Structure formats: structure tokens, C-alpha cells
Amino acid sequence: MKKITGLGIIVLLLAASCGSSKPAKPGGQEAAIDAAHYARNSLDWAGLYTGMIPAADAPGIAVEFALHENGTYQVVYRFADKDSEAFTFSGNFTWDDAGRVIVLDSEEIPPYYAVGENALTQLDMAGNWITGDLAENYVLKKSL
């Protein structure tokens, strides 16, 4: 019976430590999470973001994504190896409740983008992070 009780206590202690919501600092101290600072109010997010996202029938799609402080955006897509015209989309965006993701008012292009330090990451059509081998190709870097 003592073995079962000891094992039960260890399991409970492990479960309690895994449920901590604060990231650990070196040295075992816990880092406090500051809920008052998030992308919308802490980062210089307005500007031009550029990158090359994957395409099914081309080596990629060059993207220029401008975010403006007045809540508007403009996105320009160009296929990398084709002599085609640029596709331009513009409109308004809103922030999610956490102030970390913008939501475009468009149904023609992916609407969810996570705002990070000098980066804008395209999320999937449901607002989830894209995973897999090509995930890092959906990150646009801030150029201005």
C-alpha cells in the first residue's frame, strides 16, 4: 500500500508542475506573464512586410503586405516565375480579443495573421498556426 501511495503522490506532484502557466526562468525561478503587453500595444506593427509564400503551381508567391495604423491593409501577390499581373487586395482589419492576431475583412485571401516582433505570420483559414515542413515559409518580415 505504501508503494501505491508514494507513486500517487509523485504523479500528483508531476501533474501539478506540468500545469504551470508561467514559463520557467533559468535557475528555477518563474517568469511573471505581463498580460498588459501584447502585439497591438507593445510592438511597432504598422509598416510593410514582405516574403515568399508557397504556391501549388509556381516556385512561390511574392507577397507585399502593408499594415496601416488606421486599421487598413493592402496585400499584393505576384507569382514568382510567371509573367502575370499582380493581384491586389485591400480593406480593413480588426484585432482579436488578445491583441495578437489581426483579422482581415476579406473572403478572397487568408484572413488571419499573427503579429510578432518585425514579423507577420499567416495562419490557416481557421486562425490556427500552420504546421509542417513549410510552416516557416508563411512568415513575412517587416521591411519598413
Image (cartoon, grey):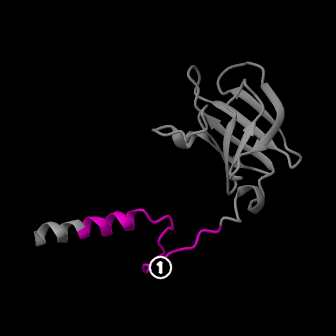
The picture quadrant where one finds residue 16 is bottom left
Q: Residue at x 77, y 60 (%)?
A: 41
The location of residue 138, given as percent across then percent down, is: 60, 39
Q: Measured from the top left, where is residue 132 in percent x and y?
A: 46, 38
* Numbered disc 1: secondary structure: loop
Q: Is residue 8 left or right of residue 53?
A: left
> Please, which residue is most extreme toward the right here?
70
Query: In this view, which residue lies farthest toward the front?
Result: 1
Which residue is tagged 1?
Answer: 29
Judge left or right: residue 125 versus residue 25.
Answer: right
Q: Nearer the viewer, residue 2 or 92?
A: 2
Count up the numbered dots: 1
Residue found at x 85% / y 46%: 68
Tell me where residue 137 appears, x and y as whole percent: 57, 40
Q: Nearer the viewer, residue 134 or 60?
A: 134
Image position, residue 33 (x, y; %) = 59, 68
Tell me: residue 26, above or below residue 45.
below
Q: Residue at x 61, y 29 (%)?
A: 60
Q: Which residues are magenta?
A: 9-34
Q: Main secondary structure of the magenta part?
A: loop
For disc 1, the neighbor class at 10 Å (few under 14, some 14 to 19, many from 20) is few
